[in-house]
Amino acid sequence: MRANQIDQTVAMMKRTVKHGLRVRDVLADSGCSSQGFIQAVRQIRPQAMHGVYGVRKDQRKYEYQGVAVDAKTLLTQGQKAGKASRCRELNPRYFEVVVPYEGVGEAQWYVCRFPYAKEWRLFLSTDTALSLVKMMEIYTVRWTIEGFFKEMKQHLRLGRCQSRDFDAQIAHVTLRGITYIFLAYLRRIDAYESLGLLFEGIVTELREKNVAERWWALFEDLLQAVLSSVAESGPMDLQQFQQSPQYAALKERFEKFFLGNPRRSLDMAG
């Protein structure tokens, strides 16, 4: 993550907190968890706001047993010390180390190797009281977030707004978010297989409803014509009305619609 991206992201989080949203954990994958970003997040609400991060095996330094070491060295020393054990709930081999992290304070460092994986994964939390299981519960939320944005872009055209007005862009994202929440709720209660299938079903339903509404509108026009003709003819019984020119004109209109091409009539009426 570049410096200007860090600044913009942190500024956005500060505005969020300022407007009353109490965030406890900030989640970021290894591509965004630079030292500068972790430091900036920690300073927003030092006593109450923490972060959970995937961490790369890069050259940043951590203090371990009084010596500044990088992630690879820390991993090697932890393995040699025989610290790894197995988590029964999640089934990875792992070990945890609390290390002083420059500009952040003490941080909990998690080293995990999951079943059938060759590489050890590195995670870091600024909350040293966070267990491995709880940390992974928070971290795996990122898959939900990524799925959210993927489906928003694929089905709801997120990011396709061409307006240069900032308020229009905010409205674009907000409306897509509301629509997604509505669709996700329907998917949950109706057990649809995918958001795409649900979206197609709703579009079809809206089209059918639109056609039904147009049919009813045309029928209502015809009914109104009947009532107007009866009112114009004055008092008469039904037999007399059947012999009148008004009845013949109405009969012709109904026959053209129902016995002719109703689709074409709908298109003309719409």
Image (spheres, helix red, strand yellow):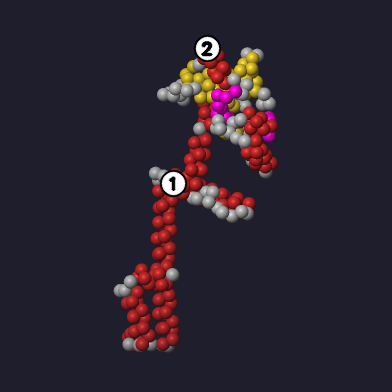
Distance between mark 2 and mark 1 Cα atoms: 48 Å
**With 14 as the anchor, is 93 left or right in this view?**
left
The residue at which mark 1 appears reads as: 195
Label 2: state its secondary structure.
helix
* Residue depicted at x 68% and y 30%: 47
Question: Quarter holding the N terminus?
Answer: top right
Image coords of residue 50 (percent x, y): 63, 30
Q: Is residue 55 magenta?
A: yes
Question: Quarter holding the C terminus?
Answer: bottom left
**With 112 as the anchor, is 219 left or right in this view?**
left
The magenta segment is 44-59
Q: Is residue 38 magenta?
A: no
Q: Nearer the viewer, residue 269 or 79?
A: 79
Say whether residue 190 is visible.
no
The residue at which mark 2 appears reads as: 80
Q: Nearer the viewer, residue 126 or 153?
A: 153
Say whether residue 266 is visible.
yes
Location of residue 16 (image quadrant): top right
